[in-house]
Amino acid sequence: MKKVITYGTFDLLHYGHINLLKRAKEQGDYLIVAVSTNEFNEVKGKKCYFSYEERKKLVEAIRYVDLVIPENSWEQKVDDIQEYRVDTFVIGDDWKGEFDSLNDYCEVVYLNRTPEISTTKIKNELRLSAIKI
C-alpha cells in the first residue's frame, strides 16, 4: 500500500482544496491529511474562520481522505513520514522547492494549484464586497 501525506489549513474549504486532495490521492492508495491546528496557524500568522475541530470534520468528510491528523509545527513532517511510513509527500506548487529536504525520507511531489481559487482570494473578495455595502 502506497501512503501519501499532505498538509494544509483547509479553512473556507473550496473546490481548489478538493482538486488538490483528489490529485494527492491519485499518487497512492492511502491519503493522510495533516490539518494545521489553530495554535500553529497563529505561529504562521493565519487567522481561521473555522476551528481546528470543524476543519478536521470537513476534511474527514472528503472521500479521498483516509486519515486526518493535526499539524502542530513545521518540524513534525519528518516524524510523520516515519511514523506513518509515508511513501510520497504532496503539497501545492506555491511551495515549490521548500520541502526538497524531505526527499531523504520519501518522494516529494509539488502539484499545480487550481489557479482561479484560493482561500486568500475568497477572503479578499468578501472583504471588498462588505466595504461596498
Image (cartoon, grey):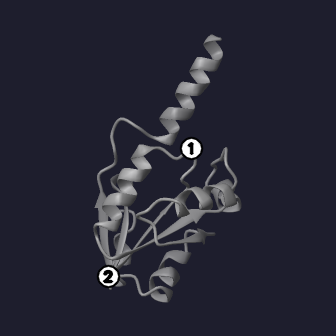
Q: What crowding class fits label 2: few (fewer than 14 Cα within 10 Å), some (14-19), or many (20 or more)? A: few
Dividing the picture into quadrants, the one containing residue 55 is bottom right
Residue 13 against residue 79 in the figure, above or below = above
User: What residue appears at the point 57 percent right and 20 percent down from the top-left corner?
Assistant: 128
Task: Specify the label residue 2 is tagged with.
Answer: 2
Query: What amino acid type should be assigned to the residue bearing mark 2?
Result: Lys
Measured from the top left, where is residue 97 in percent x and y?
33, 62
User: What residue appears at the point 37 percent right and 84 percent down from the top-left corner?
Assistant: 105
Task: Specify the label residue 85 is tagged with.
Answer: none
Residue with the mark numbered 1? 12
Measured from the top left, where is residue 82 in percent x and y?
46, 87
The mark nearer the N terminus, 1 or 2, is 2
User: What residue appears at the point 34 percent right and 48 percent down from the top-left corner?
Assistant: 113
Query: What amino acid type should be assigned to the residue bearing mark 1?
Result: Leu
The quadrant the C terminus occupies is top right
Residue 70 against residue 40 in the figure, above or below = below
Q: At numbered mark 1, what does the secondary structure look like: helix, strand or loop? A: loop
Measured from the top left, where is residue 130 in percent x and y?
64, 19
